Amino acid sequence: MLSRCPVPTAETTSEPDDPPVLDCGFAALLAATLAFGLAHSAYFLLPKYLELELGANPSEIGGISSLTWFANVALVGFVGVWIDRRGRLPLAYGGAALMTLTSLGFLRVDALGPWLVFLRVLHGFAFTLFFVAASTLAADLAPPRKLGQALGIFGAMMVSTNALAPAAAEWLANAAGWSAVFGATAAMAALSALLLVAVREHSHDRGAKREIPGLRSVFARRGIGPMLLASGLAGVTFGALFTFHQPYALSLGIARVSDFLVAYSLAAVVMRGVFGGVADRVGRIEVTRFALVLYGASPIAMVLLGATGFSWIGALLGLAHGLFYPALNALVVEGAESDVRGKIMAIYNGAFNVGFAGGSLLLGYVAEASGYGAVFALGGICSFAALAALARRAR
């Protein structure tokens, strides 16, 4: 039987000279995130499933893949408000439960159609509930001076599943069929809900003494506009590579597409786990800008190298994303009060997924009209546009 970690008190939350990042509550959160991430990340292999099992074309692959992220965008603002008013854990439980039901629903998918669309939307809702709640919990539990490191470790746990889950799902699909994959994802999502029992969040005064600020107060924060724009443009780059590397690889005769995701994830985990505190030491804006240069190089390398550099390009994207996402995340959330932190995390996540979803949808039509080279070239351009957007941010 799982036991809960001690409730944080004023004594335990006062920061010592060198506070540890990994304590009981944070470790329990990481375990729950790992289980949920394995369920969620298996669906990064969905483009292969759509093309080989359901006969989808590039625009259909882009459209269906983008649905989850459009659902994220539609819900993420509400989730941020709910988290700050009602707490983090209830929504994390809701996301894990909804992911379990969604995965079971995939057992009934046998064609493109409304049922698949419905499940992809539910998947987006499940991911939004869990990820925003869990990432906000990670920020709450982190010592302020090690915020970037804590978010890096949390992100490393989630990103590690981007390698483990697709590789395992591809093997399992070949060995036992896609129904086994969907059943396994349901089991992992249910396990994440069980592991959350051991997590305790800080108690917050959610409005007893003062009114909780609304979303408008978040958008009014100084310098947040360019940061959200940069996040969205980087999301386009990410969507170009994550959504279309699989059909592109199949067109080149590469059958095992999970190698790209494995290389990406391993590189991202190293950057977030081993070098997770570099942004706190070197400077968050400097690290973000450097990462965007690597981001822009990744899709351009895909155009130039093709099959010969398939895994190496995945690793390059992992290096870029492993630096970029936690550094800009810490930059956005630094100095935020606890009663607006959930909204900030939600909006930051939503901005990235606006780019991810929009890029996946629109670039599918570009692929049909002009080929995958044009898709990756546009992805690279968006990353350098993000770099220009950050140049306008007040330091």
Image: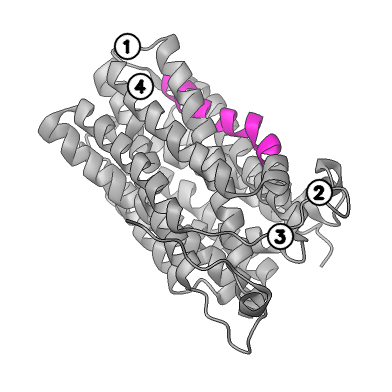
Residue ID for mark 1: 111
CA separation in Å, label 3 and label 4: 36 Å
Nearest to the eye among marks 4 and 2: give it.
4
Please provide percent x and percent y for residue 314.
37, 52
> In what element is the residue under mark 3?
helix
Q: Quadrant of residue 31?
A: bottom left
Label 2 sits on residue: 218
Residue at left offset 30%, top offset 29%: 48
Indicate whether 60 appears above or below 227.
above
Determine the secondary structure under disc 4: helix
Q: Which residues are magenta?
A: 60-79
Residue 178 in magenta? Answer: no
Residue 63 visible in the snapshot: yes
Alpha-carbon distance for marks 1 and 2?
Answer: 42 Å
Question: Chief secondary structure of the magenta span?
Answer: helix
Crowding at label 4, few (<14), some or many (≥20) Cα neighbours within 10 Å?
Answer: some
- Sequence-earlier tag: 1 or 2: 1
Up-down: is 57 above or below 280? above
Amino acid carrying label 2: it is Val
Q: CA distance from mark 3 to mark 2?
A: 10 Å
What residue is disc 3 on?
Answer: 333
Q: Amino acid at mark 3?
A: Val
Image x and y of residue 57, in percent: 38, 17
Instruction: Determine which of the numbered discs, if any, sits on residue 332 in the image.
Output: none
Q: In front: mark 3 or mark 1? A: 3
Label 3, residues with CA under 10 Å away: few <14, some 14-19, many ≥20: many
Circle 1 sits in a helix, a strand or a loop, which is it?
Answer: loop
Label 4: which residue? 105
Q: Nearer the viewer, residue 292 or 220?
A: 220
